[in-house]
Amino acid sequence: MPGTPANTISAGAHMSVRFGIYLDVNDYFCDRIALNDANTAFSAPYNLLGSRVGYKKEMRKYAFDIYAGVNNILNQKYSLGNDINAVNSRYYNAAPPTNYYAGLSVSYLR
């Protein structure tokens, strides 16, 4: 069936310590995908690995979360959404290589 991989696997782990430091690791595997009704074109399988480390702290009526992470650690080439049965075999949409992010979240607690 076009557009549907035979296998996908998603897994993740979360670790944290009492004083607020945490680590999240996630992995997503996608098998090859048929890109047309004739099953003559296929996308390559890929494996996306990501991680995030941070520190959470509650102070008075506020909760703070400062974090940094990385997506696509293995620098896989993949399509961020395939166009099934596309004209002129333009099946793929560009996806970012390894990329990094950081942030700060502040929440008001009632």
Image: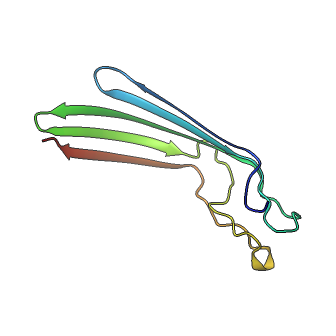
- For the residue pair 4 and 89, the one nearer the viewer reads as 4
Relative to 30, say whether 39 is above or below: below
- For the residue pair 5 and 62, the one nearer the viewer reads as 5
Relative to 14, say whether 81 is above or below: below
Colour scheme in use: rainbow
Q: Is residue 51 left or right of residue 103?
A: right
**Which residue is pictured at 78% across the width and 62% down the height?**
2
Number of dots carrying numbers? 0
Which image quarter is the N terminus in?
bottom right
Q: Quadrant of residue 88?
A: bottom right
**Which residue is pictured at 29% across the width and 46% down the height?**
104
- For the residue pair 86 and 79, the one nearer the viewer reads as 86
**Which residue is pictured at 78% across the width and 64% down the height?**
35
Name the spot of residue 69 as percent of width and height, x first. Answer: 45, 42
Residue positioned most to the front: 1
Q: Is residue 42 left or right of residue 57?
A: right
Residue positioned most to the top: 18
Name the spot of residue 26 as percent of width and height, x first. Answer: 54, 37
Name the spot of residue 22 as percent of width and height, x first. Answer: 38, 29
Which image quarter is the C terminus in?
top left
Name the spot of residue 65 as percent of width and height, x first. Answer: 29, 39
Relative to 70, say whether 79 is above or below: below
Q: Quadrant of residue 108?
A: top left
Q: Is residue 95 left or right of residue 38?
A: left
Residue positioned most to the bottom: 87
**Which residue is pictured at 31% across the width and 40% down the height?**
66
